[in-house]
Amino acid sequence: MEIILNGQPSQTPEGESLADLIKRLGLEGPLASMVNGEIIHRDKVDAVRLNPGDQVELFRMMGGG
C-alpha cells in the first residue's frame, strides 16, 4: 500500500504498524513521529496501524545548542 513518508510517496506492507515501519527503516535512537498530523507518543507506536494514504512524518531528535 502507499503512504506519504516525510512528504514522499512510499510503499509499505498492508497492515504494517508505525513501529514496524520504524524498524524496517532501521531508525534507532530518539525519534519523534506524527501520523496524519497527530503526534504519536513513543509508547503508542506499536498500536498505530498504517492505512493507505496516511501521512507519516518521522523526525530524529538531535541535541545541540
Image (spheres, grey):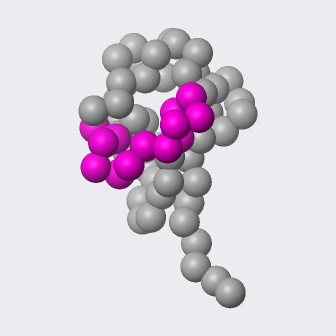
The quarter of the image holding the C terminus is bottom right
Residue 42 spot, x, y in % from top left: 35, 51
Left or right? Give the position of 57 relative to 19: right
- In the depicted structure, whether residue 39 falls above or below residue 61: above
Q: How many marks?
A: 0
User: Which stretch is magenta?
Assistant: 34-46
Position of residue 13 relative to residue 46, above or below, is above
Residue at position x 55%, y 22% in the image: 54
Is residue 39 inside the magenta stretch? yes
Seen at 40% across and 35% down, the residue is 18
Q: Position of residue 12 (x, y in %)?
A: 48, 22
Residue 38 in magenta stretch: yes
The x, y position of residue 30, in whole percent, is 44, 64
Quarter occupied by residue 21: top left
When asked about the image quadrant of residue 28, the answer is bottom left
Answer whether residue 56 is visible to the viewer in this image.
Answer: no
Q: Nearer the viewer, residue 48 or 27?
A: 48
Residue 3: tell me if it is visible: yes
The residue sitting at 28% across, 49% down in the picture is 43
Report the residue at 58% width, 79% height from top.
63
Say if 43 sits above or below 49 in the image. below
Q: Is residue 55 above or below residue 32?
A: above
Residue at the outermost right position: 7
Q: Residue furthest bottom?
A: 65
58 sits left or right of 16 in the view = right
